[in-house]
Each structure stands twice: as C-alpha cells, then as structure tokens.
Image (spheres, rainbow, N blue to C red):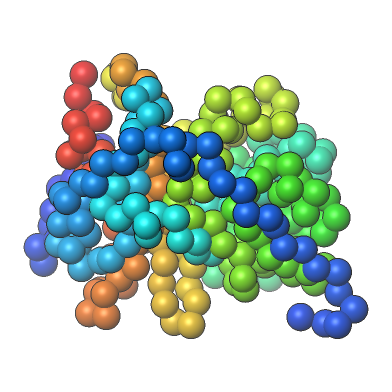
Amino acid sequence: MMKIIIGLFTGIILGLPVFAQSYAGTEVPTDFQDKSTVKIVKEFGVLLDSANMHGVILVFDAMNNTLFTNDFEASKQGHLPASTFKIANSVIGLESGVVDSDTSIFRWDGSPRRLSAWEKDLSLREAFQVSCVPCYQQLAHKIGYSRMHDWLDKLHYGRMVFDSTQTDVFWLEGGSRISPIEQIDFLQRLYEGKLPVSEKTILLMKQLMLLEKHDHWQLSGKTGWAIRNENNTGWFVGYLENTRGVYYFAVLIQPETAFNMELFPIMRKAITMKALEQMRLFDE
C-alpha cells in the first residue's frame, strides 16, 4: 500500500440573525509550542514546491519533544478545520450521549447528496470513514448549541466561532480557526488520555481513526477540505505509531493556480506519506 501511494505521488509530481446566541472559543496556547525543539526541514518545502502546493508540513516527535516543519510561523496560523472536525465532533457526540457506539446509525432521508456513498443509512464508523458531511451535520444539530460550545471549551479545540443558527456548519464556513500546531496538540491529548473524556471514547476514537496497519507501523488520521472564497485548503491530521513511538502530524496544503484539482483529494495523504518516508518513520 505504501509503495502504491508513494508511486502515485511521484507520478503526480511529474506529470447570522440578531437574536441568535453566539460563541467564540478562547485561544489556548499548546503545552509544547514554546517548549519543544523546532527543526526546520528544507526538504518539506521542496516536497510542497514539487507538488505545486504551498502550505505546512508539521510532524511532532513526542518521544524527543521535537517539532519538524518547513515553516514554524505558518504552523501557528489558523484555518477552517473542515472535516478534520469530525474527530472532535465524534468525541462530543459520544460523550454527550447523542451516539453511544460506532454502530449508531445516521438515517438517510432519501434526498440527493453530493456523494453516492452518503446516500444510504450509515453507522458512525462508516460515516467517519466516508467523511459524510450530512451525517455529521445531523450529529452536531442533535448535540445542540449549548452542549457543543460547552464541550469545545472543555476540549480546548482551536478557536471555533458560531451562533445558535450555525451549530451544524461552523467548521465548514465562517470564522472558526484551528492551526496545524493546535491540531497536533489536540491529537496528542486525545491519544494520551488527557482529554476530559472516558476511556471508552478514547479507545473508540483510536479505532475509528485507524487507516492502515502493518507489521512495524500503523497510521491513523482524518482528512479535510475547506473551500473559502474559491480558495482550497486541504488537511491531513493524525499520528503514526511505529516500533520507536508515536509521531503526530498535521499537513495543510493549498494548491497553486495551475494545479489540477482532480488530483487534490489524494495529494493530502500522498504528501504526508512522502514526508514521513523522508523521516524514515516506516523503517523497522
């Protein structure tokens, strides 16, 4: 699988109402932002340039408390979380009791949806895997404004901005922002059990996020894609576990004008995998 992704990557390189309640999260500095060693990796910048992209590749080596990136200042700049918010949304849904397991069902009402994969009843696990936007909008609507902003405060998840009419769209549009470094901070706290949530939720989230499992490493994460003022922003956030430990990553890419957008969805993961390969994290 790894060789297929890298080969594909190489081929690509070559070829609001007045009455509404409102909420704005408080910016919370990450624990490691000012305490970690930061190493600038020029190869990450070359990788993005060769892919006709600009953006940030950020990898955190938790064992050695070291951040690797092409642009540390850019890693602190916020962007819409898009579908990476499905991680936090799932946590909140589970902890608030709106869903009780990965088999909880989102019913399809029969109306047309953007992707055919969304046009059926889906379990929480299936909805996460196919990134079903309407399913997670349904989840957010059931969570409701009050519980959503209370849980976002507890989780210290970026800086989400929304009112009571935007509970099911605020991660896709508007003023909500989360930075790559905040993404990693949230993922690390989730993985290490430092969020105010149950062990059951943590275990279930690790299962939901698992993408690939091999003899010496496994990859977990979630992609996202935000379109704002015709500008595209792609995310891939998650962590790699290998025989040496855990490496968290947050990759944010934005295509240059001439980029073929049909290739954009696969580039988020392809660029990430290439960066992790450059760090030799797939080696035994």
Asked whether, in this view, residue 284 is left or right of residue 16, the answer is left
Residue drawn at 48 percent across, 55 percent down: 179
**Rendered location of residue 188, percent (x, y):** 51, 33
Image quarter of residue 82: bottom right
Q: Residue furthest front?
A: 34
Residue drawn at 60 percent across, 40 percent down: 125
Query: Could you tell me if residue 33 is visible in this image?
Result: yes
Residue drawn at 44 percent across, 55 percent down: 76
Quadrant housing the C terminus: top left
**Rendered location of residue 267, percent (x, y):** 29, 57
Asked whether, in this view, residue 217 is left or right of residue 83, the answer is left
Asked whether, in this view, residue 88 is left or right of residue 42, the answer is right
Image quarter of residue 110: bottom right
**Rendered location of residue 1, percent (x, y):** 25, 37
**Rendered location of residue 73, percent (x, y):** 37, 57
Which residue is at the front of the view, 59 or 82? Answer: 59
